[in-house]
Image (cartoon, grey):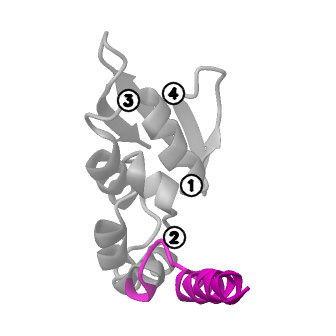
Amino acid sequence: MMKKLMMIASVVAACGLFSVPASAISEAYRAQLEKSGCTQISEADGTCDPTHVKKHAHNTHDDKATPQNASRDLHDHLVGKTLSQAIGHMHNSHWNPLNEEETRWGKSGMIAELDLTPAGKIRDVWVH
């Protein structure tokens, strides 16, 4: 009987030690993702860079919605990525697809066009 009680007590103690909730990411990283507008998924698949976006988030007074700024931003994020990664980034950045292939996008009176390589990677981005 004493052996059973000791075994039950040790199992309960072990469960108590391992029942502490685990966090997948640190609070600092979670805050960085929130500030940047990225998610863990968009950061992992390459459609969002929380460190790059964070820099822009602090400079919003200089970053007016102009075709030049949008072109620079999209070029930095998309060139070399696959079309599916680019589509994810465009959706996360609140652009709206204008064609079925999702190579033309619209936002705030601007139109962004994605130029693809034969392999399906983004070669260039034009915003007008």
Q: Which residue is mark 2?
A: 37
- Is there a contact, CB below 8 Å, between mark 4 and mark 2? no
Q: Name above or below for residue 101 compared with residue 14.
A: above
- Rendered residue at 46%/85% (across/down): 31
- Rendered residue at 43%/72% (across/down): 64
Q: Which residue is mark 1?
A: 92
Is residue 27 one of those drawn in magenta? yes
- Is there a contact, CB below 8 Å, between mark 3 and mark 1? no
**Amino acid carrying mark 2 in the image:** Gly
Q: Which mark is residue 82?
A: 3
**Amino acid carrying mark 3 in the image:** Thr
Q: In terms of sequence position, does the residue under pointer 1 or pointer 2 come before the other? A: 2
**Amino acid carrying mark 1 in the image:** Asn
Give how far apart the Cα atoms at labels 4 and 2 are: 23 Å
Q: In terms of sequence position, does the residue under pointer 1 or pointer 4 come before the other? A: 1
Q: Element type at marker 1?
A: helix
Secondary structure mostly seen in magenta is helix
- Side of 35 relative to 52 (left or right): right
- Magenta part of the protein: which range? 1-28
Mark yes or no: residue 77 visible. Answer: yes
Residue, far top: 118
- Is there a contact, CB below 8 Å, between mark 1 and mark 4? no
Q: In terms of sequence position, does the residue under pointer 3 or pointer 1 come before the other? A: 3
- Is there a contact, CB below 8 Å, between mark 1 and mark 2? yes
Spot occupied by residue 13 in the image (x, y as percentages of width and height): 59, 89
Quadrant of the image containing the N terminus: bottom right
Give how far apart the Cα atoms at labels 1 and 2 are: 8 Å
